[in-house]
Image (cartoon, grey):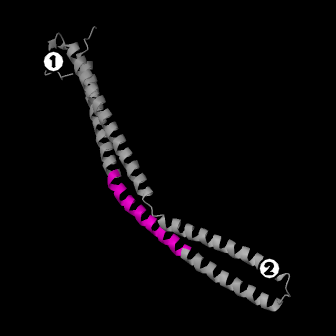
Amino acid sequence: MPAPKNFRTAFNGFNREDVVCYLEYLKSRHASEVNQLKTEAESLRARLDAYCDRQLEKRDCSGLEEENAALRQRIQELEQEKEALAAQLAQQSQEPVDYPAQELEAYRRAERTEREARERADQVYRRTSLVLNNAAEKLDSVTSQVGPLADSILEQIRHLESGVGATRQSLQDAVCVLEQLRPNHE
């Protein structure tokens, strides 16, 4: 709806229809500006959410998958060793038993297993620490990129507020003009 260029004069002031048309024009223009700014804000929010989702998906978990595969392999090896020991034990149960030698061998196996477990725990700790540090760095990077985007959104919201304030002032001015134009029937 185009804005009226000027108001026609009427007895005791301006033509009422011209003033009403002008007020409707202001209202529709304000509504379209508000809708446009809301659409832009929603678009920016969607872009921000998509960006954050992409950043979180890029985390490096391949090291953990390799560690998991290695641990599964070690479990299979230990199960095979257990079966071999069970077979050996069954065979030895028929032979005379040398308990001190068996205890010494068991003690050595326990020490070896404990050392390997400590080494694996240290490796897992280092890899986990590395992954967490990488995630923290990526989060810092995302945070530094989110700041300007949030500032842009806030600036658009401020622009919207100033547009609303200007429209409110225009409507108040129009009300004052209408009050002045109201015929006095006294």
Where is residue 29? Give x, y as percent: 25, 28
Residue range (magenta): 124-149
Q: Which residue is mark 1?
A: 7
Task: Estimate the x, y position of residue 178 in percent, counting from the top left.
Answer: 25, 19
Q: Mark 1 near mark 2, Cβ–Cβ under 8 Å?
A: no
Within 10 angstroms of label 1, few (less than 14), some, or many (20 or more) residues?
A: some
Q: Considering the whole magenta stretch, tell me its main secondary structure.
A: helix
* Quadrant position of the N terminus in the picture: top left
Give the residue drawn at x 66%, y 81%: 114
Which residue is identified by label 2?
A: 89
Most foreground residue, 48 or 165: 48
Q: Seen in the image, is 39 located left or right of residue 133? A: left
Residue nearest the viewer, comparing 125 with 8: 125
Q: Is residue 72 left or right of residue 164?
A: right
Residue at 32% x, 55% y: name it: 148
Would residue 33 be found to the left or right of residue 49 on screen?
A: left
Task: Tell me the kind of residue under disc 2.
Answer: Leu
Helix, strand or loop at disc 1?
loop
Which quadrant of the rendered structure holds the C terminus?
top left
> Of callouts 1 and 2, which one flags the residue occurring earlier in the amino acid sequence?
1
The residue lying furthest to the top in this view is 185
